[in-house]
Amino acid sequence: MALHLPDRLLPGLPYPLGSSSDGLGVNFAVFSAHAGKIELCLFDPSGRRELKRLLLPECTDEVWHGYLPGAAPGLVYGFRAYGPYEPLKGHRFNPHKLLLDPYARRLVGQVRWTDALYGYRLHSPRADLSFDRRDSAAAMPKAMVNEDAFVWEHDRSPQVPWSKTVIYEAHVRGISMLRKDLNANERGTFAALADPTFIEHLLKLGVTTLELMPVHAFLQDSFLVERGLRNYWGYSTLSFFAPEPSYMSNGDLNELRIAVRRLHSAGIEVILDVVYNHTCCGSELGPTLSFRGLDNASYYRLLPEQERFHINDTGCGNTLNMSHPRVLQMVMDSLRYWAQSFHIDGFRFDLGSTLGREAGGFDPNSGFFDALLQDPVLSRLKLISEPWDVGPGGYQLGNHPPRFAEWNDRYRDDMRRFWSGEEGLRGGFAQRMMGSAELFEHRRRKPWASVNFIASHDGFTLRDLVSYSCKHNEANGEEGKDGHNENFSANWGAEGDSDDPAILEVRARVQRAMLTSLLLAQGTPMLLAGDEFHRSQQGNNNAYCQDNEISWVDWDAARRPEGVALTEFVSRLNAIRRDFQVLHANYFLHGAKEIVPGLNDVSWFDEAARPVSDADWRNPVARAITLQLACKRQESSKLLAVRMAEAAGASGLSEDDPTDIVLLFVNAGHEAIDFRFPRGGEAGADGTEAGAEAAAANTAASSKATAPEDYFLLLDSALERGLPDSGAAPHAAALSAVVTVAAHSVQVFANRPLQLPSAIYPVAANEWMTRNEWGDRA
């Protein structure tokens, strides 16, 4: 039945913001502190023909609102805002420009680039001080009144403890565009995330948490369109509530909900990468699409006494004004919407320092952080910040409030430099392996606050780190000027692809060494999608505009022998990490805690099993080191290991040996090195000679705990799959043995064999694999 459109709206309510249906009609509410009036514009279902304009009749507390009786979900609309056009005072109202509802939950159409989208005459000598009277409606996407309906019965968040979290960063489109086994319309969409093959891959890797790059609706920037390129990454947000339309195979918002539901059923969390620091509208010279036309002076931070200009702490032309209560409310409402309507488990905040800015700069007690951390819904989720922006004092690694984890670029850079052969990095390597305590150990924060990564979407892939000495971004059309210049990479003899077996062997070995350092370090590891099977971007370290094979994950590579081997290697690393609690401790390890007499929680030795002295730490050419970790095995961990071992037909744990000891022999040099096993009492509480004398007094009483007769080889990163033969019995090495560690590699030993047969977390997820809700896939 056609909707009868009245001549005027009823007053309605100022809350909730956006459009909301009550079954009898639709309420509309939008914030603007400086508008003189706001019109609701109604369109036909295609969004091409404007049907009527109705004035929002009431304004309460700076919220304009009205109620349309008889309207229902599916109604297409936009706004026009009337007010002063005074750019010198920060006001840019232009009623000729159709504006997208900031709270739009579903979009119809897309931006079609035309000069009419700008509030000023684009080529006028007066620039943005001029005024444009062309109507932009034909070029604008519209909002659709949406009704969220989905049966979440029995869905439960996996709530993986931070200390056990392993993150996998992926792009919705890129992760499945080359999946030939999927229907063509499902590739590059939310539907592909629910595919059992993808979920099984994550489980076998040992991934607990899937982090998706931006899924908010975003803009295809004009400068990219003009170059024949696309905004691939999606960091130009158009709508904070609406999913990106191109990520839905059939236009159904429930596709994402289904994906989350199925991932949850497998024990996998879903985190969204969100961009609340700026919008897609660029600087004061950008188009008028929504916020600028509704209330530029409220939504954006403007230069004091030069309100014509935007503050650009983001490097993207504008900065959202998080100090304004209505802007802060919008961000909180958006986060809560995704958490409650889509059951999202956490958020990674792009340019998180911007969100914490007040008038005086970054403040860990800013309104944004306070609002987020007191929220009964949001404060319980996983919260991750990218702790920097390009503004003054923008680098804030380690300075975010408790309950936040932070991307640790110091970990990334030190590990890259250490394994690429730079000198003087032994101390930096040790700090990063111990969770970067100098950055995070304050305000009762835990090691998991450091999100460790070797590669992310921004920069080289792991494979490219060992294949290119410099960036190759020519395809971006910016004359190679974009992207980081300091990549701390090495090509090991040839730039780019090579068919030299010796070069390929070194590259693969360095990759495995870096993965070992990543997954066995204290903190929260993050793996970039495809790094587990040698994904390359052909040397492009800034593929933000490459919506093509450069960025898409090549699943054929996952099936090649070298891809299968590296995937198995990563899976074994995650199994080791899970099985040994000391590899994901819930407190910072300093060597000050004595596990048993003569055995500290962490000790450092050189290759000859001598404690590392202060002078040794400063030795610029030393590239070999031994890390010894120890902890009391928790009862829950012992019971789990016993149950898993018995299920696999292996012997259980000895009740009189409740201590786990893990050794990492690390050789970042260019030649093989012989390592010796440390003996009990050789290192003091701090891993130096100063404490060796005191520890030696306890050696006799604790020799069994600190010096087991045998160590078991858990992993050798010099080998493709980590062990000589995956079917062989655990390989034991006598304490007196000398172990030869190949160049650019790590060997991992423990005082017991690996108990867990797989990397899958939690154990209950094995039931998902067995049940296989989609039938037998053999």
Image: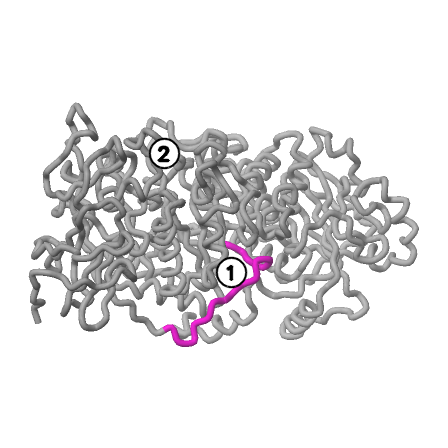
Going from N to C along the chain, the mark reached first, 2 or 1, is: 1
Which residue extends farthest top? 125
Residue in the picture at 13% in, 62% down: 9
Estimate the x, y position of residue 664 in percent, counting from the top left: 70, 48
Q: Quadrant of residue 258?
A: bottom left
Residue 523 — which label?
none
Q: Residue 279: tell me if it is visible.
A: yes
Residue denoted by label 2: 311
Residue denoted by label 1: 208
97 relative position to 334: left or right: left
Q: Is residue 687 one of those drawn in magenta?
A: no
Tell me the element at label 1.
loop
Q: Is residue 165 one of those drawn in magenta?
A: yes
Q: Amino acid at mark 1?
A: Thr
507 relative position to 212: left or right: right
Estimate the x, y position of residue 687 in percent, counting from the top left: 79, 43
Magenta residues (range): 152-167
Q: Amino acid at mark 2?
A: Ile
